[in-house]
Image (tube, rainbow, N blue to C red):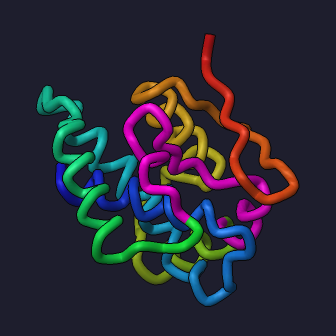
Amino acid sequence: MHCLLEKMLLLHELYRIPEIPSRYIPGTSRHLYDIVHLYEKLQGEGVKIDWNLLNKLRMHRSRWLGRATTVYRESCHRKLCFIPPFRLLGPLMDDYRRLRKEVIFDSSWEFPVLIGRIQQINASLNGIQWPYLENDRHQALLTKTA
């Protein structure tokens, strides 16, 4: 559970950086892959997401990591969004292809399937779905499911 929530928070924070340096992308798609597999494993075991743990992790990250681009109160479970923005899909797809050759040997998960599953997981947690739009300051204008 801890690892899953940490990865969700990490991507939530990363996707809020207006101009993500290219050095931040390599290996990032692995977090997407891990989120899907960890979430499905926990669901299979009947484990519920621990929102109290998420809040503790959020406060810890706020205190010790404190990114200027992240408003940590926006990473509460109702606003948590680890779905990649459109502008990163190309670089993330390239990263995922590379990782599938070197690290991830699961041939059943093509990138579009992975992103679709990430969207489903995020929507199941709090109703935020993909695609979402960004305003001119690269802040997410999140859409909710009906």
Q: Nearer the viewer, residue 35 or 54?
A: 54
**Image position of 96 (left or right of 74):** right
In reply to whether residue 122 is colored magenta, the answer given is no
Vertical relation: 43 (above or below) 115: above
Residue 55 % position (x, y): 25, 46
Extreme residue toward the right, this view: 136
The quadrant in which the C terminus is found is: top right
Residue 89 % position (x, y): 72, 60
Residue 12 % position (x, y): 50, 56
Extreme residue toward the bottom, this view: 23
Extreme residue toward the top, this view: 146
Q: Nearer the viewer, residue 38 or 65?
A: 65
Vertical relation: 108 (above or below) 128: below
Q: Nearer the viewer, residue 73 or 91?
A: 73
Total of numbered circles in the picture?
0
Residue at 23%, 35% in the rendered image = 49
Residue at 53%, 63% in the rendered image = 70
Vertical relation: 130 (above or below) 56: above
Tell me where the magenta segment starts and ends, as one range: 70-92
Vertical relation: 9 (above or below) 93: above
Residue at 41%, 73% in the rendered image = 66
**Image position of 42 (left or right of 11):** left
Residue 45 % position (x, y): 12, 32
Residue at 51%, 52% in the rendered image = 109
**Image position of 135 (left or right of 8):** right
